[in-house]
Image (tube, helix red, strand yellow):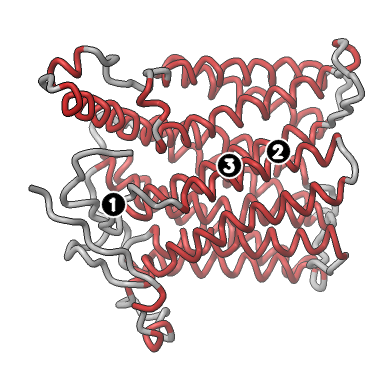
Amino acid sequence: MLSRPPPEPGWRGLHWRGLARLGSLAHPLWLCPFRPFFALAVLSALGLMAAWGLFLLLGWPLPAVPGGPFVWHAHELLLGFALAATAGFALTAVPEFTHTRPASARAVRRLALLWLAGRLAFWASGWWPQAALALSALAHLGLLLGLAALLAPPLWRDAQRRHLSFLWAIALMAVAAAGFYADALRGLYPMRWLHALLGVLMALIVIAMSRISMRVVNDAIDAHAAARAGATADTTADAHAALPDPYLARPPRRNMALLCIGLYALAQWAQQHWGWAALPAMGGWLALAASAAMLALMGDWHVGRPLLTRWPLLLYLVYACMAAGYGLLGLAGLGLAGLGLDAGLGLPPGAGWHLLAVGAMGLAVFVVIVIAGYTHSGLDKAGRPWVPAGAACLLLGALCRQLAYAAAPASLWLGLAAALWCAAFALMAWRMLPVWLAPRADGAEGCAGLAQRPDALE
């Protein structure tokens, strides 16, 4: 019989004096690379969106960065929140995929300090546009290149080199960041590079979820088979015979989705760079192609009732948000009125961008942090009623952000969207920060997963 999993640490169990030693490499925060970066991602998701909501609703000041408040908002969402989550995931997942040791705590701390330096320097760029922007550029590029340097050797030494796509995605993130700072330092409006970076992150989500979903969906299939066997007194083999084949993240559909996402990102960048009149329509068709490719990719997930369990369904909804976001971008690019679909909606491209950022990216980061953050802390991710509540907040927030374009008063929907996003990540901060600030309770070391898996998943 399996032993009961160790209890989840809480705020009461923390030794507060130990929090003053967060800089020490012996602190539990540095036990595994995901811990500091997931903590930074959660805190930035909460703080940055709260600041943005207060700016929109009450006019509270934001850092006066080149490009204005909308550039600050997009930059911090992508090169702040999403970059921290990407670093935490990659530094933990790649060693697991390649069966190598994770990066040292000292190297991870250097990268975390670069992340913090990037925040402070970019926020100060309104006072010292050239010097602070240059420092912010060095910090962000140093983080991305340092991340690539840590991941490249195990990825390249892997005999089949099955996971090199992570390295290419990080390299493209570095190119987009470099382009952003090159434009900002020259006094140009740099938003085109942030749109391109969002496209890279959408591709990275597809790449990462193709790995994560193989375990999550097949675990759900196995759990459903075990439940059927227990309920009907059938053998496990008989129960499995009535279920679909094991789920496989097939490369053809995934590669088609990645191709369409990449082509749309290139068309969008070119249109914003050169202003070619023909490209909005081309970009619209490419966005619709990306939406169709995502819908086709979702077809691989249709495995029956196991899909309706918690973890497969939450990951599936990430793809649904991505398909809907690219669909809205396609309709905006082609012109709703030109297709006879206007009907007073008047949805601009921002509706699609926000559905990708708030819905797809926000939900993907949320779910991956829960799965990896618990599993690699030696804790069972099952149960946790706060998780579906937080995911529902993110999805409702994405819906409210869409309603801000179509229904009055827009300020109400904007405020609700920001509040729901903050509520989701406030729940996560309250439940998971104590886990990352405390030693492992299961006796395992470093980034090890669950030593014993429960008999069934939700």
Residue 369 lies left or right of residue 276; in this view the side is: left
Residue 430 lies left or right of residue 237; in this view the side is: right
Label 1: how many Cα within 10 Å (few below 14, some 14–19, many 20+): many
The answer to whether the residue labelled 1 contacts the one labelled 3, judged by CB atoms less than 8 Å apart, is: no
Measured as percent of width and height from the top left, residue 329 is found at: 74, 26
Measured as percent of width and height from the top left, residue 292 is found at: 61, 15
Label 1 sits on a secondary structure element that is loop
The answer to whether the residue labelled 1 contacts the one labelled 2, judged by CB atoms less than 8 Å apart, is: no
Q: Nearer the viewer, residue 234 or 84?
A: 234
The Cα atoms of the two marked residues, 2 and 3, are separated by 14 Å
| Residue type beneath disc 1 | Asp
Residue 426 lies left or right of residue 312; in this view the side is: right
Tell me if residue 72 comes above or below residue 353 in the rendering.
Answer: below
The Cα atoms of the two marked residues, 1 and 3, are separated by 24 Å
Q: In this figure, which residue is indicated by the disc labeled 1?
A: 380
Q: In this figure, which residue is indicated by the disc labeled 2?
A: 399
Tell me if residue 288 comes above or below residue 40 in the rendering.
Answer: above
Q: In this figure, which residue is indicated by the disc labeled 3?
A: 361
Q: Residue at x 50, y 52 (%)?
A: 85
